[in-house]
Image (cartoon, rainbow, N blue to C red):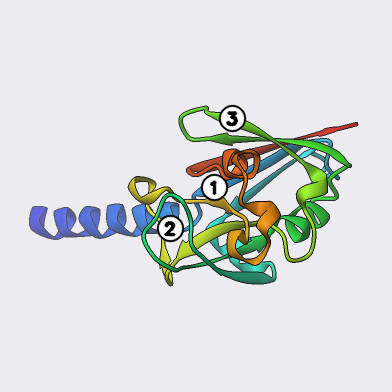
Amino acid sequence: MFKTLKSFCVILVVSLGTSTLAEEVILTVSGDVGPNNGQNTWAFDRKALEALPSQLIETTTIWTEGMQSFEGVSLDVLLNHVQAEEGTIRAVALNDYAVTIPTSDAIEGGPIVAYSRNSRAMSVRDKGPLWIIYPYDANEAYQSEEIYARSIWQLNRLEVVAQ
């Protein structure tokens, strides 16, 4: 009986662990955004981000070797989804490093919140789970120190501040 109970507990722990990981919030968007269930905070797990229209950017970066393929949700689509006000975005990483991005950067064909690189989910060790990527090779204007500084990795929070 003890062996059966032990097996059941292991299965239960594994099952609970799997469902918790599948629903882990990887991005919180707050501030001057539209209401979400009465709150001005939106929480996205990976599946919720993947449910939004995705965009692919193939580009080189100053942090990686060779051509890279990034997939994610366009920053303009994400901001429209959460009904963000115009202004600035304070993008914050897991280690609390933060950068400021004007909402005017969020345009069609602009930056994405990437959740995969070269068809693989990005681990924290590999600059993930989320990384703001601009299409650096597509527009010379994106090849500046100012834009590179906005390309925050290990992203986990966006705080929108209206003008």
Q: Which residue is mark 3?
A: 98
Residue 108: x %, y % from top left? 78, 64
Callout 1 secondary element: strand
Q: Amino acid at mark 1?
A: Val
Q: Nearer the viewer, residue 135 or 98?
A: 135
Number of residues whose C-alpha sits closer than 10 Å to that of mark 2, classed few (under 14), some (14–19) or many (20 or more): few
Q: Amino acid at mark 2?
A: Ser
Q: Amino acid at mark 3?
A: Ala
Cα–Cα span, label 1 and label 3: 19 Å
74 over 159 or under it: above or below: below
- Which residue is rendered at x = 83% and y = 42% of the image? 33
Give the number of the mark in front: 1 or 2.
Answer: 1
Residue 131: x %, y % from top left? 53, 50
Q: Is 77 left, or right, of 14 in this rendering?
A: right
> On the rendered image, what quadrant is the C terminus found in?
top right
121 over 99 or under it: above or below: below
Tag 3 near tag 2, CB within 8 Å: no
- Which residue is rendered at x = 66% and y = 57% of the image? 140
Based on the displayed image, in which of its 4 quarters is residue 161 positioned? top right
Sequence-first disc among 1 and 3: 1
Give the number of the mark in front: 3 or 2.
Answer: 3
Q: Which residue is mark 2?
A: 19
Q: Nearer the viewer, residue 56 or 37?
A: 56
Q: Nearer the viewer, residue 62 or 43?
A: 62
Sequence-first disc among 1 and 2: 2
Based on the displayed image, in which of its 4 quarters is residue 98 positioned? top right
Number of residues whose C-alpha sits closer than 10 Å to that of mark 1, classed few (under 14), some (14–19) or many (20 or more): some
Numbered circle sitting on residue 25: 1
Sequence-first disc among 3 and 2: 2
Numbered circle sitting on residue 154: none
